[in-house]
Amino acid sequence: MSEKTFGVRYERVHSWLDEFSVKYSRAERYKHRKHRHHAEGIEEARELFGDLGALVAEQHIRADNEGSLPQAEDYLIREYE
């Protein structure tokens, strides 16, 4: 998706965002999103990969969250529901 939009695949950003997925079972793999799939994660991506990396991260996060851009605290709330 990022290649079509931005002209680059930027696999390093995608891998970085999904890095924690291996810590969860297949059924609960979505829980890895609490680590970096949020607005604060985009700013971390910007520090590591620059502005284009942040745009790629935002696109990835929105795609995984049906268009929404959660905050880190949103994941804490969901875990206790």
Image (cartoon, rainbow, N blue to C red):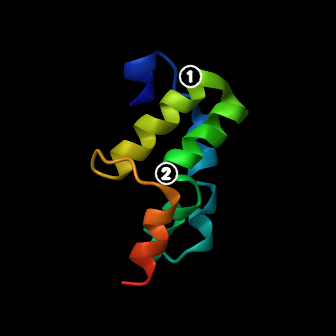
Q: Which residue is mark 2?
A: 38
Which residue does the image show at 49% across and 72% down from the upper left? 76
CB under 8 Å between callouts 1 and 2?
A: no
Which residue does the image show at 41% across and 35% down from the upper left? 59
Q: Amino acid at mark 1?
A: Leu
* Residue at far top of view: 7
Vertical position of residue 72 compared to residue 23: above or below: above
Vertical position of residue 76 compared to residue 18: above or below: below
Q: Where does residue 79 sit, x and y in percent of width and height?
A: 44, 79
Q: Is residue 44 left or right of residue 8?
A: right
* Residue 19 visible (yes or no): yes
Q: Quadrant of residue 30?
A: bottom left
**What is the distance, in whole Å, between disc 1 and disc 2 at their CAs?**
17 Å
Question: In terms of sequence position, does the residue under pointer 1 or pointer 2 come before the other?
Answer: 2
Kind of element beneath mark 1: helix
Residues 29 and 45: in front is 45
Q: Where does residue 65 sit, x and y in percent of width and height?
A: 34, 53
Q: Which label sits in the foreground, 1 or 2?
A: 2
Q: Amino acid at mark 2?
A: His
Which residue does the image show at 59% across and 60% down from the upper left? 35
Q: Where does residue 33 sit, x and y in percent of width and height?
A: 50, 60
Q: Which residue is mark 1?
A: 52
* Residue 27 visible (yes or no): no
Quadrant (top left, top right, bottom left, bottom right) of the N terminus = top left
Kind of element beneath mark 2: loop
Q: Would you call the spot at circle 2 few (<14 residues within 10 Å), some (14-19), or many (20 or more)? A: many
Q: Where does residue 43 sit, x and y in percent of width and height?
A: 60, 39
Q: Would you call the spot at circle 1 few (<14 residues within 10 Å), some (14-19), or many (20 or more)? A: some
